[in-house]
Image: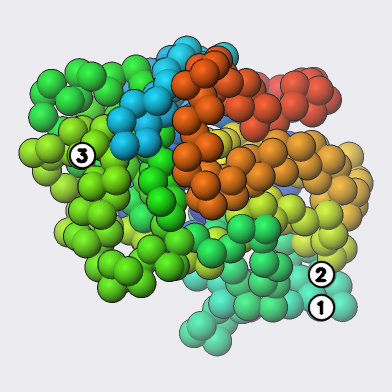
């Protein structure tokens, strides 16, 4: 057992690294536990909305300097293209491989102690705080725990089911042919098909990130095999098939994640346990606001903690911030999966895509509440 820090952060993704940086900068002792020894890819759409970019700038990370790919518009396709329009805000795309490492470096420079290859097996309350237990029998006490393990639950604190929990997510990076890469530049493309939907966009490397979800029923029809699933999806979407024609997959196999509680939004938390990012709210992937929510929850949690508010007050406040966007995105996701033909309504009025993009973001009022709570971190 080691010394007791003010804050123990479980998880080194965007939410965990960001809250560690905010707290350490304000003089709190912080230990951040990251289960992976080195940078790696994660199941994620890798879309950075303007809110996410602003939060990263507050942390001293300039994504354009990292080569982030610009995104200015969205295309929606079923079998063929349905609609296209400009986004209501400028966006970027940056791989989690690059982003997570940059954030961990910021946390370390701010003064947080970053420990890698540390997987938290269980979190338990104690008489004077919290205790994180590891699989090797060791433990780490802390006065408060910030739970930021993304879509992976920790024993003793599992999340409840979401409103849409029947989807399995997959991610694969592709090297596109030059004409297809040029056609995709500046766009995020959404593809709707029976049993799910997919998003495709370029990253800082110039390669394309394909992130998709499929119902368990669709997976059973494909016997759980990735090649069969991708072939079936491309058969249903000529637009996606065209993009991937001749493309080179860059992973030996796709990354996959199941039992994702889309639509989950928690308003309760135990004293001293601060749930961040996907541990607090899970927005369907097509909305592209997961990273923004992670960074926002970190900044709001740090604000509440530093002024002596409780983790329960924070949980209620974050739920109020996200209730509308998570609810709207979940309803749209359920509708698209159940009746893919509904997407064709966008053909009648393409600006509906702009409206959906606006309504599935964190409300401006929630962001302005925090505008003066944390000064810019200069490192």
For the point 40% across and 34% down, the residue is 190
Q: Quadrant of residue 188?
A: top left
| CA neighbours of label 3 inside 10 A, class few (<14), some (14 to 19), many (20+) | some
Q: What is the CA distance from the residue labelled 3 to the residue labelled 2?
A: 53 Å
Name which of mark 1 and mark 3 comes first in the sequence: 1
- Number of dots carrying numbers: 3
Q: Nearer the viewer, residue 160 or 142?
A: 160
**Callout 2 secondary element:** strand
Name which of mark 3 and mark 2 comes first in the sequence: 2
Q: What is the CA distance from the residue labelled 1 to the residue labelled 3?
A: 54 Å
Question: Mark 2 = which residue?
Answer: 129
2 and 1 marks in contact (CB < 8 Å): yes
> Residue 213 at what x, y percent from top left?
43, 53
* Quadrant of the snapshot with the N terminus: bottom right
In the rendered image, the vertical position of residue 124 relative to residue 196, given as above or below? below
> Residue 47 at what x, y percent from top left?
46, 33
Is 268 placed left or right of 140 in the picture? right
**Image disc number at residue 126:** 1
1 and 3 marks in contact (CB < 8 Å): no
Q: Quadrant of residue 209?
A: top left
Q: What is the CA distance from the residue labelled 2 to the residue labelled 1?
A: 5 Å
| CA neighbours of label 2 inside 10 A, class few (<14), some (14 to 19), many (20+) | some
Question: Mark 3 = which residue?
Answer: 241
For the point 61% across and 58% down, the residue is 164
């Amino acid at each position: 057992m080691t010394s007791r820090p003010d804050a123990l952060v479980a998880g080194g993704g965007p939410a965990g690294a960001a809250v560690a940086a905010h707290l350490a900068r304000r003089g709190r002792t912080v230990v951040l536990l990251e289960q992976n020894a080195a940078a790696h890819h994660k199941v994620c759409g890798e879309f950075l909305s303007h809110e996410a970019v602003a939060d990263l700038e507050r942390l001293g990370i300039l994504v354009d300097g990292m080569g982030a790919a610009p995104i200015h518009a969205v295309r929606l396709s079923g079998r063929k293209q349905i609609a296209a329009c400009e986004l209501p805000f400028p966006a970027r795309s940056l791989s989690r491989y690059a982003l997570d490492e940059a954030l961990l470096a910021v946390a370390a420079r701010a003064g947080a102690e970053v420990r890698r290859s540390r997987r938290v097996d269980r979190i338990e309350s104690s008489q004077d705080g919290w205790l994180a237990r590891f699989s090797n029998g060791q433990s780490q006490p802390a006065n408060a725990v910030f739970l930021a393990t993304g879509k992976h639950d920790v024993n003793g604190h599992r999340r409840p089911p979401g409103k849409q929990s029947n989807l399995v997510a997959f991610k694969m990076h592709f090297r596109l042919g030059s004409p297809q890469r040029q056609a995709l530049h500046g766009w995020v493309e959404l593809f709707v098909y029976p049993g799910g939907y997919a998003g495709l966009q370029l990253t800082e490397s110039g390669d394309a990130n394909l992130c998709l979800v499929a119902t368990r029923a669709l997976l059973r029809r494909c016997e759980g095999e990735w090649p069969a699933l991708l072939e079936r999806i491309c058969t249903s979407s000529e637009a996606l098939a065209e993009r991937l024609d001749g493309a080179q997959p860059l992973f030996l196999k796709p990354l996959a994640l199941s039992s994702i509680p889309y639509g989950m939004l928690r308003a309760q938390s135990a004293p001293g346990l601060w749930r961040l990012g996907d541990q607090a709210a899970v927005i369907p992937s097509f909305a592209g606001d997961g990273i923004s929510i992670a960074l926002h929850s970190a900044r709001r949690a740090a604000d509440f903690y530093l002024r002596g508010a409780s983790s329960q007050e924070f949980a209620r406040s974050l739920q109020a911030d996200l209730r509308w966007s998570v609810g709207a995105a979940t309803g749209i996701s359920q509708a698209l999966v159940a009746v893919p033909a509904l997407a064709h309504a966008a053909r009648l009025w393409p600006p509906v895509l702009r409206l959906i993009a606006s309504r599935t973001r964190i409300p401006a009022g929630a962001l302005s509440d925090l505008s003066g709570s944390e000064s810019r971190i200069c490192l």
